[in-house]
Image (tube, grey):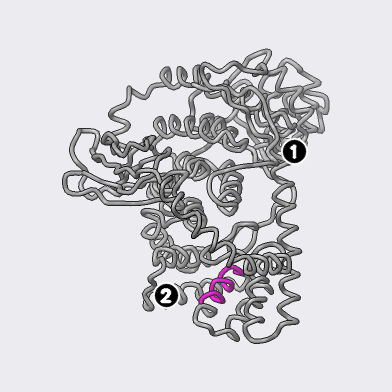
Amino acid sequence: MFVRELPGQAEMSCKPRGLSLLPGRVRPAAHTRGSRVLRRIRSAVPFLLAAVVLASPSLSAQQTREATLSGVARDSAGKAVAGAQVVLRGENLPASRETTADTAGHFTFAGVGAGAYSLTASSGTLRSAPVGVSVSASGEQPPVNLILEGPDVQRSASAPRDASQAMQFADNPDFAIAAVTDWTAAGGHGSDSSLRTSEALTREAVKLESGDSGAAAPKLHGGAELEGSESELRAAAAKDPKGFEANYKLGRFCVQAGRYRDAIPPLQAAYRADPGSYDNEYELARALIMAGDAARAREHLQRLLARRPSADLHRMEGELDEKLGDPLSAVHEFQEAASEDPSEENYFAWGSELLFHRAIWQAKEVFDEGARLYPESARMLTARGAALFAGAQYDEAALDLCRASDLNPESTEPYLFMGKIEIAAPDPLPCVVAKLARFEKLQPASSLANYYYAMAVWKQQGETRDPLVMERVKAMLTRAVTLDPQCAEGYLQLGKLSAGRQEWERAIGLYQKAIEANADLSEAHYRLAVAYERVGEDAKAREQFQLHDAIAQEEAAEVQRQRKAVKQFVVVLPGQAAKQQAR
């Protein structure tokens, strides 16, 4: 899968640029404007209080009756799952609510107002699919059954995993991609911080490498292995500069060595000598793609597809379409590739194309099938975790990433993903702290391992923070910045710890170190300004507030630019009429 990068993306030492970190409150973009608004609010308080007193009888009369939502958590065999963690989410809830099922699997949520909600349950490696519930104002709700399944149960309950079944899914998905639309007015679940994290994770998910050999290697011309050193191959090509065999072998040698630009001239010479050689033209197309010459590569690919279509060629064509700014054609090529060959590579390419263009739930559907067919694919689970996070299914995303880390504990990607979603999610996530503890144990010299583990432990503390635990957090953050002096986020979090203890001079020093490591870290400028205010350095505070505002505006403009560079897929579901032909 080719890397899809937007121009101007930059990685910071401890995290990608633009991801906001918790805990902490974000300051409004304009400090002085906010102060004027605050003064107006204060002046209006007496009138607001009077209005509330006068309106309270009518408000009381308009209160709707609250309902009690209850149900049972069971496994796929129908047995109660004692101690299952049940999560309730809804648009009317300021934050998710959680409860624990009793020994009989029963759970209850009292005081639930009318509206639409989603229930999920988890217990260890078991989890349920989200169940939608509509609560009426009557106060009486039927019980909800949540069925928890693990990966083994899901696979044994499914039909046999053979190629024909996978092809049937690929041929007939329950959605179609009909068009693209603008993504600049992006909306999403959760806060702007969560949305930015989702976009960053999506960019990283589509670049994940396979744990195996990846795409199938092309055939050798005539079935012959390459013989001789590079100098011998070059000498042979020099003796016969217009011949086929010597130029083809030299070109293939360069392709295998990863020197794609060097491979193009001899492969082109071989193509002129024998335009009918499928294997040579395939190698030439591959070399052109890897060298960045998408237009010429496409000409050869289309000829190859006309002669002998294959899943490999469809996937390569999809990658070229994406590079050439035609994502609508690209997604259909990836779907065709998965239909012809339901390989892990083709399912991942199809799903990540959907995810990259914000067809989130359709990407999850493809990753679901890919994970069912290839349960040992860590990148499939990691990418599905990114899709679930984008859909605000935070607990489910964490469980996928934890499972991915179990498949290959030495791989860093699942840990980095779960560290980022733990920071951005509104509530602490299941299984993350234990997995990040393993990450830190496996890689004690990693600044990121210490940083993300510290942040997860801090978040799990909530409002009631154990002083001993917070000392551990401080020690891990200190280790993170010691291992990597450019870990700006580590200095920022240490500064926030000192500010929480009103150690303002120490906090100022730490915020200054964060800015030295990354001058574009807007939150560090804001918090440094607040600290300066606390010690009476008003002029320095104003300067830092102004820097914060300028950087925040630049960040917002960069986010808008990145969103403008990505077109969102328009999805047509069964029963809906497509306004535009898919192809």
Asked whether residue 191 is in view, the answer is yes
Can residue 493 be found in the magenta stretch? yes
Q: Are marks 1 and 2 in contact (CB under 8 Å)?
A: no
Query: Which of the numbered marks, if any, corresponds to residue 291?
Result: 1
Q: Secondary structure at mark 1?
A: helix
Q: Residue furthest top?
A: 307
Q: Position of residue 570 (x, y in %)?
A: 62, 27
Name the foreground residue: 239 vs 90.
Answer: 90
Q: Which of disc 2 and disc 1 is earlier in sequence?
A: 1
**Position of 20 relative to 237 (above/below):** below
The answer to which of 112 and 319 lies nearer the viewer is 112
Q: Which image quarter is the C terminus in?
A: top right
Residue type pointed to by label 1: Ala
Residue range in magenta is 487-497
Looking at the image, residue 308 sits to the left or right of residue 410; the answer is right
- Verify whether residue 322 appears in magenta: no
In-front residue for pair 259/41: 41
Q: Residue at x 58, y 81 (%)?
A: 507
Separation (CA) of disc 1 from disc 2: 51 Å
Q: Amino acid at mark 2?
A: Met
Q: Is residue 155 left or right of residue 264?
A: left
Q: Which residue: 31% across, 47% down? A: 86
Residue at x-position 73% and y-position 69%: 32
Q: Quadrant location of the N terminus? A: top right
Q: Is residue 400 visible?
A: no
375 relative to 106 in the view: left or right:
right
Note whether 108 is above or below 365 in the view shown. Answer: below
Q: Is residue 104 left or right of residue 405?
A: left
**Above or below, comparing residue 526 to residue 536 in the picture:** above
Decide which of 239, 314 is in the foreground and name it. Answer: 314
Closer mark to the observer between disc 1 and disc 2: 2
The residue at which mark 2 appears reads as 470
